Image (cartoon, rainbow, N blue to C red):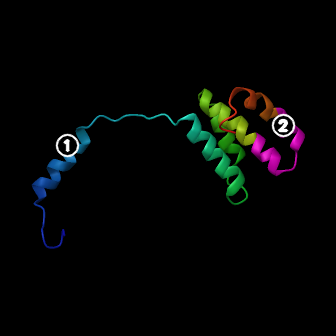
Amino acid sequence: MLLTHHLPDNRLADARNRANQMPKYLIQSSQNYLMAKVRSLGMYCTEGALTDEQLNTYSQGNLREQLAAKYGLAILLYEAKKYDEARHILQPMLAQNQKNL
């Protein structure tokens, strides 16, 4: 389409200017998204996809990220067959939110 119907440069420049003038919004990740992300990295990706560095970053973040870091640690412990330690982390989380663990 663009090969046969060229746009003038001034229309492209106008579109860029309008796009640059739009307000920028910072959208926080939801708790469901963070839990799903940690779960998929920890359980379904190749080994080492969920790193200690990621968990440390999450643990220093907001409350949702801290909860995701705990969940990620429990998943890593579970994958390492340290079931009792994983259960110790997961039981309080299950009492608060049974639907997303």
Q: Position of residue 39 (x, y in %)?
A: 67, 47
Q: Residue at x 63, y 40 (%)?
A: 35
Instruction: Please indicate whether residue 40 sits to the left or right of residue 79 in the image.
Output: left
- Give the dominant element type of the magenta stretch: helix, strand or loop: helix
- Callout 1 secondary element: helix
N-term-proximal mark, 2 vs 1: 1
What is the magenta range?
74-88
- Please name the amino acid that badge 1 sits on: Arg
> Crowding near pointer 1: few (<14 within 10 Å), some, many (20+)?
few
Measured Cα–Cα span from mark 2 to mark 1: 52 Å
Up the image or down, 5 lies above or below 39; here it is below
Q: Quadrant location of residue 64?
A: top right
As for residue 87 lying within the magenta part, the answer is yes
Q: Position of residue 51 (x, y in %)?
A: 70, 48
Q: Residue at x 82, y 47 (%)?
A: 78
Per the image, the residue denoted by label 1 is: 18
Q: Position of residue 7 (x, y in %)?
A: 12, 62
- Please name the amino acid that badge 2 sits on: Arg
